[in-house]
Image (tube, grey):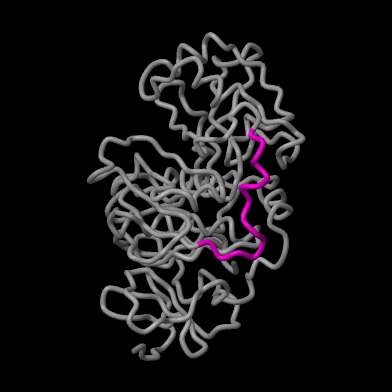
């Protein structure tokens, strides 16, 4: 039975509200002193080793027309249950953290449940029986209901960068909401250098046939059978496109955050209250006797609880808005030693210490 505890501000609090287009970081200059530096946005991905995912479809879907695309959308307001089939607690926590980015703009809720619970979305990582699957992919929307494994992260491990966790997770959960790749938007008019694209994707790490390239890059969806916005090269759902892959030098870098169009568009697909004013929105009540894993959340007697390795933590009273991410976090102090996992505030933002520097977790007040 749950025991009500005091609300705790946990050191490992993760958020998904990030600063679009700019990556701030701290650079460790010496053991005695650290200074803030501002880094430029990520450079355009190089042609070699582009990490791209593949949309998966029901086997009876007509890929030439995507005629059932609209039918793959969930119902606005739906609680979509998600579980992990494998993976350690660290990589699982990163997927949990960044999948939530969509909830701020779409009237849906991703509820993460224990491995032995029923779920709509079932996630695997590259280990065990899936050790040979090095790609990342997701079934589109409600197709997930038809399969025992519906999303996979083939390049996630303990050494994956924060940017890669964020980019790939948000992208794959976009597919899980029914979103297509943006370069296949009905109104996208990319002037491809087809032979250059065929040649690139024929090699590692993809080894795609010309037909696979046609399907994954050149095929565009029909406007009459798909929901779409104006073409958005900044979309999180866009493949990186090197200039060498187009005839006019057009290129798209690695988009690492939701774009403004992503946010406004998904709100039209899943309209309604996003539940941002209640921390218990979309969370199921505690069920006595059910098995819960670390990270599972439940409601109990009007409070939100999260399962930890040692018991349950009370995250707050239902009906309350999510807490300011910077609440209780001390400001950064130059020259002070910080360990991996430590969090500080700096110039209105929350940062967390990593093995390589500092990661911006979002703006204070959010």
Compared to residue 164, the image places residue 341 above or below, namely below
x and y, in percent, of residue 107 in the image:
65, 62
x and y, in percent, of residue 84 in the image:
36, 57
The single residue placed furthest to the top in the displayed view is: 195
Name the residue at 55% across, 38% down.
Answer: 255
Frontmost residue, 74 versus 52: 74
The single residue placed furthest to the left in the displayed view is: 128
Q: Say if the magenta span includes residue 71.
A: yes
Compared to residue 274, the image places residue 202 above or below, namely above
Compared to residue 351, the image places residue 229 above or below, namely above
Frontmost residue, 197 versus 74: 74
Q: Quadrant of residue 32?
A: bottom left
The C terminus: image quadrant: bottom right
The N terminus: image quadrant: bottom left
Name the residue at 72% across, 40% down.
Answer: 228
Frontmost residue, 252 versus 279: 279
Numbered-mark total: 0
Compared to residue 85, the image places residue 208 above or below, namely above
x and y, in percent, of residue 80 in the image:
53, 61
Q: Is residue 279 left or right of residue 336?
A: right
x and y, in percent, of residue 85 in the image:
33, 55
The single residue placed furthest to the front in the displayed view is: 60
Q: Which residues are magenta?
A: 66-80
Q: Say if the magenta span includes residue 326.
A: no
Identify the main secondary structure in magenta. loop
Frontmost residue, 254 versus 337: 254
Name the residue at 45% across, 16% down.
Answer: 209
Q: Is residue 184 left or right of residue 340?
A: right
């Amino acid at each position: 039975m749950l025991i009500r505890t005091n609300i705790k501000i946990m050191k490992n609090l993760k958020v998904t509200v990030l600063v679009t287009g700019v990556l701030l970081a701290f650079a460790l200059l010496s053991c005695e002193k650290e200074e803030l530096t501002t880094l430029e946005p990520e450079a355009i991905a190089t042609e070699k080793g582009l990490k791209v995912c593949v949309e998966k479809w029901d086997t009876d879907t007509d890929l030439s027309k995507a005629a059932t695309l609209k039918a793959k959308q969930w119902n606005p307001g739906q609680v979509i249950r998600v579980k992990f089939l494998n993976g350690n607690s660290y990589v699982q926590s990163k997927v949990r953290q960044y999948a939530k980015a969509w909830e701020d703009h779409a009237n849906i809720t991703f509820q993460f449940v224990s491995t032995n619970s029923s779920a709509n979305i079932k996630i695997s990582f590259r280990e065990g029986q899936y050790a040979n699957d090095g790609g990342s992919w997701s079934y589109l929307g409600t197709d997930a209901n038809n399969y025992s494994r519906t999303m996979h992260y083939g390049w996630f491990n303990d050494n994956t960068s924060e940017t890669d966790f964020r980019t790939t997770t948000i992208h794959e959960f976009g597919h899980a909401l029914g979103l297509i790749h943006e370069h296949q938007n009905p109104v996208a008019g990319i002037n491809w250098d087809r032979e250059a694209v065929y040649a690139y994707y024929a090699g590692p790490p993809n080894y795609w046939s010309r037909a696979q390239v046609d399907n994954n890059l050149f095929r565009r969806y029909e406007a009459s059978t798909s929901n779409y916005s104006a073409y958005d090269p900044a979309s999180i759902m866009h493949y990186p496109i090197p200039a060498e892959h187009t005839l006019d030098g057009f290129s798209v870098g690695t988009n690492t955050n939701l774009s403004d169009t992503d946010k406004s568009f998904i709100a039209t697909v899943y309209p309604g209250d996003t539940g941002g004013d209640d921390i218990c929105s979309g969370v199921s009540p505690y069920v006595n006797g059910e098995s819960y894993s670390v990270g599972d959340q439940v409601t109990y007697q009007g409070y939100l609880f999260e399962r930890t390795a040692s018991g349950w933590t009370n995250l707050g009273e239902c009906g309350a808005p999510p807490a300011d991410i910077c609440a209780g976090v001390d400001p950064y102090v130059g020259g002070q030693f910080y360990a991996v996992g430590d969090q500080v505030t700096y110039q209105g933002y929350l940062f967390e210490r990593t093995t390589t520097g500092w990661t911006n977790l979002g703006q204070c007040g959010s």
